[in-house]
Image (spheres, rainbow, N blue to C red):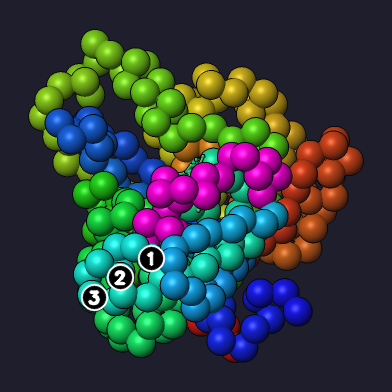
Amino acid sequence: MSLAQRSDAVHVRAPGKINVYLGVGARHDDGYHALATVFQAVSLYEDVFAHPAADFSVTVRGAADPASVPTDDRNLALRAAKLLAEETGVSDGVALELRKGVPVAGGMGGGSADAAAALVACDALWGTDLGTTRLHALAARLGADVPFALHGGTAVGTGRGDRLTPALARGRFDWVLVTSEQGLSTPDVYGRLDRMREGSALADDEPLSLDVPVGVLQALRAGDAQALAPVMMNDLEAAAVAERPELDLVLADGVRAGALTGIVSGSGPTLAFLCAGPEAARTVQEELRVTGREALHVHGPVAGARIIG
Ligand code: ATP
């Protein structure tokens, strides 16, 4: 019997995300940039199992390159479990088992999803019953994208991306994701953006007032992929493409294959192609696969971190 099949383990599933819109403002003194973003949780998941244990440990399965995910205190899921124990005075440990479905360093918040899942799983395992507000506060301390992985659905994120307001999104949106075997470092992409902006007004210390364009919210509310496509935007895209020039070719290939539009997801290198519906997405997926790309058909919005079974 594998560890995960033991009935005393808690299994939580948390989704990866796409930034349908990502406006990046000035860099603050704490190193973070002001963001105005719209997240959508999509049907590509991290499965986290929390097993009772005396100490803290984490094992990782399913990563294309296992060495890319730390299993020491740098692991975000382990940090989440330890933070929860510290805050609640729990003296138990946990053996976390991560089954990764979201590409590592792919710009889809896989590590953040693990952290959100670990919070929910340990809260259930230890019976600490923190409730949404306190879990959200702990999530925000772990990383800017962690609150959204708890929340799921579609949401506007401001501040560092961690101040969330739910956004209405009707129906379902079909996406084709093109993943890369080799990830991109989020700090490298932001660093590249900073250098690209040097000397421009955006390099000023003054924080920008950023807003998500109303057209993005209207298209989501209407469930209208055709209207959403032309207003999607990612300020990190040029920097991600500068780091990984071949992304531009793949973006063009996806549109040629019939996608309404393509965008770099977060800091990349995953590309997200919005399609008119499930059938169109299957066609785009097939055509991209013929060109030798790893293409996945997913949909959004889906729920945030949830206990399974
Ligand atoms: P970010 O959340 O910084 O935008 P991302 O979504 O592009 O990142 P992640 O898969 O979350 O990518 O991982 C970014 C880095 O975080 C990895 O390269 C890895 O070193 C580290 N990391 C820490 N914990 C985890 C985890 N549980 N899963 C994956 N990576 C992790």
Kindly indicate whether the residue at mark 1 contacts the one at mark 2 (C-beta within 8 angstroms). yes
User: Please, is residue 23 above or below residue 285 in the view?
Assistant: above
User: Please, is residue 269 above or below residue 38 in the view?
Assistant: above
Where is residue 105 drawn, in percent x and y? 54, 41
Where is residue 2 drawn, in percent x and y? 72, 74
Q: In this rendering, would 21 be left or right of 3? A: left
Which circle marks residue 283 in the picture?
none
- Give how far apart the Cα atoms at labels 2 and 1 are: 6 Å
The front one of 213 and 304 is: 304
Q: SS of the residue at dot 2? A: helix
- Residue 73 included in the magenta stretch of the image: yes
Q: Residue 151's quadrant in the figure?
A: bottom left
Residue on which the image places disc 3: 88
Q: SS of the residue at dot 3? A: helix
Where is residue 147 drawn, in percent x and y? 34, 63
Q: What residue do we see at 76% from left, 57% from top?
A: 280
Residue on which the image places disc 2: 85
User: Please, is residue 188 above or below residue 264 in the view?
Assistant: above
User: Please, is residue 153 above or below residue 235 in the view?
Assistant: below
The front one of 81 and 188 is: 81
- Magenta residues? 63-80
Q: Residue 55's quadrant in the figure?
A: bottom left
Q: What residue do we see at 38% from left, 82% from top?
A: 126
Kindly indicate whether the residue at mark 2 contacts the one at mark 3 (C-beta within 8 angstroms). yes
Where is residue 284 drawn, in percent x and y? 77, 49
The three-letter amino acid code for the residue at tag 3 is Thr
Residue on which the image places disc 1: 81
At label 1, counting other C-alpha atoms closer than 10 Å, the crowd grade (few under 14, some 14-19, many 20 or more) is many
At label 2, counting other C-alpha atoms closer than 10 Å, the crowd grade (few under 14, some 14-19, many 20 or more) is many
The three-letter amino acid code for the residue at tag 1 is Ala
- Give how far apart the Cα atoms at labels 3 and 1 are: 11 Å
Q: What residue do we see at 82% from left, 53% from top?
A: 283
